[in-house]
Amino acid sequence: MGLSRKHIVEGTKKCLQRLQMDYVDVIFAHRPDHTVPMEEIVRAFNFVIDQGWAFYWATSEWTARDIEEAYHVASKLGLAAPIAEQCMHNMFHRERPEKEYAPLYEKYSIGTTVFSALASGLLTGKYNNGIPPDSRFAVHSDFFKERIAKLKGEEGQKQLKSVKELAEFAEKELGCSINQLALAWVAASPNTSTVILGASKPEQVLDNLKALEVIPKLTPEVLEKIEKILDNKPEPWSSFGRPKLDKFGRFNPIFG
């Protein structure tokens, strides 16, 4: 537990043993650990890389502030900074990946590894008419009790209404299912590097992969229609009337 040098090094070695692998491409620091100095964390993951146990390191569920600090420390020490952030991103969870992380995308070209792209199954339409007895909400009701309570509330009912409208839109205008649309929508984001798929059956994986066929159909016009259905796009950071500048700090009229 935690991100001390001891836990990172010992945890990595044990993980590789369980995986029966010599190395992994990317190792993630799952959740920040504010009890450990950032310099220790950055040095520890670079040690892992130097040992050949991983090629890169990344963060998971970190705040933008924590990721920014990791970059500053890595830059100061001449070490490798994280290359990606694993975060929740779906049509109903947008504030952090689309607003909070926005400056990081622009400054560091960092990408996201997305989990829960289907909002724990909500974006499959399975909960449109209640909670099926074989669903994860029913089987693991204690774990999802807050989510279930939220689903029954005003916000949850609004989301279910959007799901039904999206399902109809996906079928009539794009010729796909709502889960394929939801996955394609996340994958099409210019800041998404990877989308993690969760499935309990092989056929679900094959069905979800059809989202790749939907991505080319997501034109600006289609995306605008989706935004009207969702009606939850995060507001951009206020510029307080100042003109927008490019990455070199220059004013360009085409930016507005």
Image (cartoon, rainbow, N blue to C red):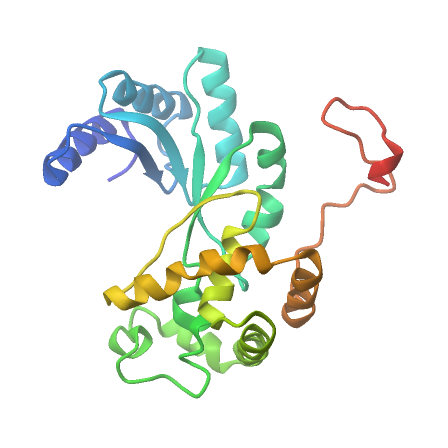
Image height check: is 126 above or below 18? below
Quarter holding the N terminus? top left
Q: How many marks?
A: 0
Left or right: 22, with 234 as reference point = left
Rendered location of residue 175, percent (x, y): 53, 72
- Residue shown at the point (34%, 70%) measured from the top left: 144
Left or right: 238, with 155 as reference point = right
Name the residue furthest bottom.
Answer: 129
- Residue shown at the point (40%, 20%) measured from the top left: 39
Quarter holding the C terminus? top right
* Residue 117 in which image quadrant: bottom left
Image height check: is 49 above or below 189? above
**Near-viewer residue (182 or 233):** 182
Left or right: 8, with 217 as reference point = left
Rendered location of residue 101, percent (x, y): 57, 41
**Near-viewer residue (170 or 128):** 170
Rendered location of residue 206, percent (x, y): 32, 62
Image height check: is 127 above or below 32? below
* Residue 59 in which image quadrant: top left
- Residue shown at the point (33%, 20%) measured from the top left: 46
Rendered location of residue 223, percent (x, y): 65, 61
**Near-viewer residue (228 or 102):** 228
Left or right: 125, with 145 as reference point = right
